[in-house]
């Protein structure tokens, strides 16, 4: 047990230094300072609690130790607030202050009585763990690291509630030997779970950062649709994996008179129009369809397992939805319309995706030339 406790405290001290280094390297992410302080305080509080074995006065080994032991999970929570909602996110200082004052008052008036200090501390830690779990529920990505951290916190809260039950069950009696053994096991689990949670926090940051970088590389910043490079890669990969043996429709879509919209109403309204069209595409098309912004006011669509008749209906529906729902954008009467060029192929193993995209682009040019706000298929122009 002493060896495991020593190793646990050493790991927490190393994690505290690592967190402080990350805070220096990423000054915009203030959560690291909260988490570094959490690990450091945990080590100090644990050493104070262990000092009871050396006849250190209770005011230090019990009162101060338990006061500090309640801080680490609370600092994990405040760090999560800053991590999830941004470095300038407001913290619930009023609620935290009221709870801290109540905890310190109860602790200072009862720490010499029976097991009250341990019970109060266990309840405070369990409450902070539950708060952290609730905070993590707002973090949809990364799910794996978030769920893993939630599990560690839930086990920690359960261990603290089990400790509370054991102490309350023997409040006025001496602790039997089997209960002492259980409490030692809970103490060990408390220290190990604290270490696991501390190690998972930087993992949460790095996975989130990696996902953000991937998103920035693959998605168009304005519309949040796949950018040209990602769309081309995904579409080509689909055909390579066997999509070439199924019927498929490819469309090129262009906003009509987009330059005049920017010139008349400004680029902010033009950007809003692009986002409006992207939203309509996402709503009308299926989840299996591939959508990408090719650049400027051009979008491309790949619709797997789609017959020619269905593709024509979908193209007309897209055109009508834009005409009906994007006529006014940002309060400006844009009378926005789109032109669509499309091509259709069935079992086109002899064609590559670039050829299909070129056919759709030629059909789009024909749609523009014939008056705009229309859907033209490649075979219709032949």
Image: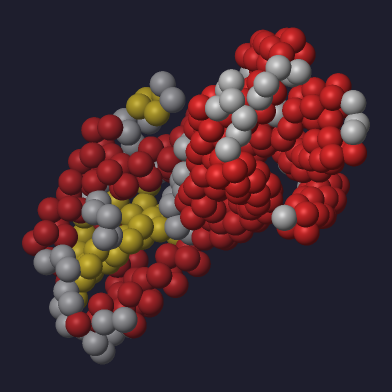
Q: Is residue 33 left or right of residue 315?
A: right
x, y percent for residue 219: 50, 55
Q: Is residue 223 left or right of residue 306?
A: right
> In this orientation, does residue 222 appear?
no
Please tell me how many numbered marks the rendered image carries.
0
Tell which of 194 and 256 is nearer to you: 194
Q: Is residue 305 left or right of residue 191?
A: left
Residue depicted at x 12% and y 66%: 308
Q: Quadrant of residue 353?
A: bottom left
Tell which of 187 and 274 is nearer to you: 187
Residue depicted at x 31% and y 81%: 241
Residue depicted at x 71% and y 14%: 110
Q: Tell which residue pokes out farthest to the left in this image.
A: 309
Residue depicted at x 74% and y 18%: 111
x, y percent for residue 61: 84, 30
Q: Is residue 212 left or right of residue 79?
A: left
> In this orientation, does residue 174 appear?
yes
Tell which of 100 and 83 is nearer to you: 100
x, y percent for residue 31: 72, 38
Say above or below: 318 vs 324. below
Tell which of 66 and 127 is nearer to you: 66
x, y percent for residue 4: 73, 57
């Amino acid at each position: 047990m002493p060896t495991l406790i020593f190793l646990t405290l050493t790991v927490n001290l190393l994690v505290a230094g690592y967190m402080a280094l990350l805070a220096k390297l990423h000054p915009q992410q203030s959560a690291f300072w909260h988490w570094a302080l959490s690990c450091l305080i945990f080590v100090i509080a644990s050493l104070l609690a262990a000092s009871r074995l050396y006849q250190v006065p209770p005011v230090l080994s019990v009162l101060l130790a338990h006061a500090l032991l309640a801080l680490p999970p609370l600092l994990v929570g405040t760090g999560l607030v800053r991590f999830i909602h941004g470095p300038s996110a407001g913290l619930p200082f009023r609620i935290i202050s009221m709870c801290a004052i109540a905890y310190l008052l109860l602790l200072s008036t009862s720490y010499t009585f029976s097991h009250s200090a341990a019970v109060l501390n266990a309840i405070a830690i369990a409450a902070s763990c539950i708060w952290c779990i609730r905070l993590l529920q707002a973090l949809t990505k990364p799910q794996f690291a978030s769920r893993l951290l939630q599990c560690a916190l839930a086990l920690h809260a359960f261990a603290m509630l089990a400790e509370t039950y054991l102490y309350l069950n023997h409040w006025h009696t001496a602790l039997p030997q089997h209960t002492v053994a259980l409490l030692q096991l809970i103490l060990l689990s408390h220290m190990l779970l604290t270490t696991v949670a501390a190690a998972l926090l930087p993992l949460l940051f790095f996975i989130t950062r990696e996902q953000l970088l991937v998103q920035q590389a693959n998605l168009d910043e304005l519309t949040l649709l796949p950018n040209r490079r990602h769309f081309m890669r995904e579409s080509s990969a689909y055909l390579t994996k066997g999509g070439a043996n199924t019927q498929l429709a490819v469309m090129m879509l262009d906003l009509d008179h987009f330059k005049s919209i920017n010139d008349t109403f400004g680029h902010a309204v033009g950007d809003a129009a692009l986002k409006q069209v992207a939203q309509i595409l996402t709503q009308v098309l299926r989840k299996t369809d591939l959508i990408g912004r090719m650049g400027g006011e051009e979008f491309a669509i790949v619709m797997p397992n789609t017959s020619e008749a269905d593709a024509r209906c979908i193209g007309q529906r897209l055109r009508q939805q834009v005409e009906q729902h994007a006529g006014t954008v940002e309060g400006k009467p844009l009378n926005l319309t789109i032109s669509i060029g499309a091509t259709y192929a069935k079992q086109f193993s002899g064609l590559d995706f670039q050829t299909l995209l070129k056919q759709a682009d030629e059909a789009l040019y024909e749609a523009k030339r014939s008056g705009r706000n229309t859907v033209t298929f490649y075979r219709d122009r032949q």
